[in-house]
Amino acid sequence: MRALLAGISGVNKDVVVANLLGRLRANGDIGGVIDTQGYGAHGYADQRVGADPQELFAASVEDVFAEQGDDLASTLSSFRPTYQLDAWQRAGLAIAEQMEDLDPRHSLLSTHLTYYTSGRQFSLIDIPTIRRWRPDCIITLVDDMLDIRAALARRDAEQHTNFQLRLREILGWRSAEIAMADLLARNLYEQRTIPHYVVGVKHPAEMLYRLIFHRRRYPVVYSSFPITAIRFDADRRARVDGIREELHRRFIVFDPLTLDEGTPQVFDKARAACADDVTEITITADEARWPLDNAGTLKEGLPSAFPMTLDPREALEVWDDMENQVRHRDLTMVEQAQCVAAYRITMGGRLSTGMYSELMYASHTAEPARPVLMYADPGDGGLDHPFLRNFNHRTYHATEEWFEAIANILPAERDNPQRPLF
């Protein structure tokens, strides 16, 4: 298995890889002891990982920049296109040559596919070099824009990077990184495309481990459930969390709550502050998103981003773009899954419009259409809503029966002899 990990600054790819290596070790895929402090071009072989170099290779292009004596910040900030391209290629070729010497069983390679500095987005990747890495899939790692902003500020305070971004810049760079990964996945090889997945770093580390290494063993599921209507109802939120945790335990699950940027509290507070000419607001974790614990996730070990201070005008200027990205991101996750596991679309007797749009997309727009497996609690009411007849679905009234139906969805390409075995 060879995975290429992309993502903008602030997603902390080093921590993600360290947590992923931890799952490889815990599940017996590699031996040795994992030190989650970091990894580099030689991380697979030295004391930080301690694995057999023919079992695992983990490398970061940006780390190799430093090992080769190139300062990443100054390389990116100077307008020297030829030097910048050469620097990326030197790092990429060093990785390729080492991989070809070792021919490792598994590799995790990370790089920015696009860079952002001084208001300018650009790419330095060399496709022939990446082709020598022979990746089997591309993973674009993403995180909430407020978490990215906090991570960049924390790095600036610790390392004096003098690199911070407005929320609008974060959204724009993230979109460009995803688009470049899409392009690369479609065009890296002449005879075939490779999978590209957008994965929030608040997913469990086990989810990404299964997605990369064991897609043939588990169905890939998009979990759909009410969010907006029950966000402030602790009891119903706890019920949804219980179902989410069970889905994650059994399957590979794309979970919309791993990116939760559209909370009304933040933007309502920003509007009120602007109306009162207040230039700074404080955002707490409870206001920013549905509460999630980092324990066991791809970003375990990182400090919380909250509380944080924010210029309310900065929040309001991204509202429309953020809402548009939320809609498209959830539908992208539907596309990445084999089926949709829908939980209580009429929870509290009110039809969830967000769920409805996801299920309509899965049934009528996605190609091929994704099966919709719905759990409905008769106590919710509203199950006779005429809109519920607009998409193809199977309804279950017992959770275990629902889980069993999901389990019977065959993992993707299990029987495709052309698909490389990981």
Image (tube, rainbow, N blue to C red):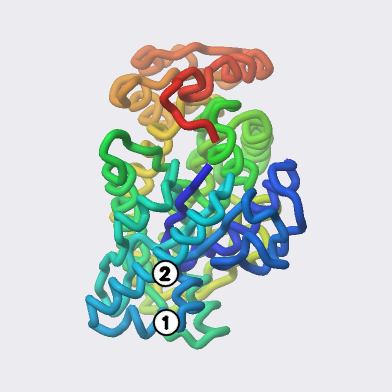
User: Percent x, y for residue 74?
Assistant: 37, 85
Earlier sequence position, callout 2 versus callout 1? 1
Could you say which quadrant of the image residue 277 lies in?
A: bottom left
Q: Residue at x 44, y 28 (%)?
A: 419
Asked if the residues shown at circle 2 and circle 1 are in contact, with their CB atoms under 8 angstroms apart, the answer is yes
The three-letter code of the residue at mark 2 reads: Ala
Residue 323's place in the image compared with 34, above or below, is: above
Nearer-the-camera pick, 90 or 202: 90
Residue 333's place in the image compared with 123, above or below, is: above
Q: Secondary structure at mark 2?
A: helix
Q: Mark 2 sits on what residue?
A: 91
Which mark, by number, is residue 70? 1
Q: Residues within 10 Å of mark 2 (few under 14, many from 20)?
A: many
Q: Residue at x 58, y 13 (%)?
A: 396
Identify the image quadrant of the C terminus. top right
The three-letter code of the residue at mark 1 reads: Asp
User: Percent x, y for residue 261?
Assistant: 45, 54
Could you say which quadrant of the image residue 365 lies in?
A: top left
Nearer-the-camera pick, 86 or 151: 86
Q: Is residue 261 visible?
A: yes
Residue 90's place in the image compared with 174, above or below, is: below
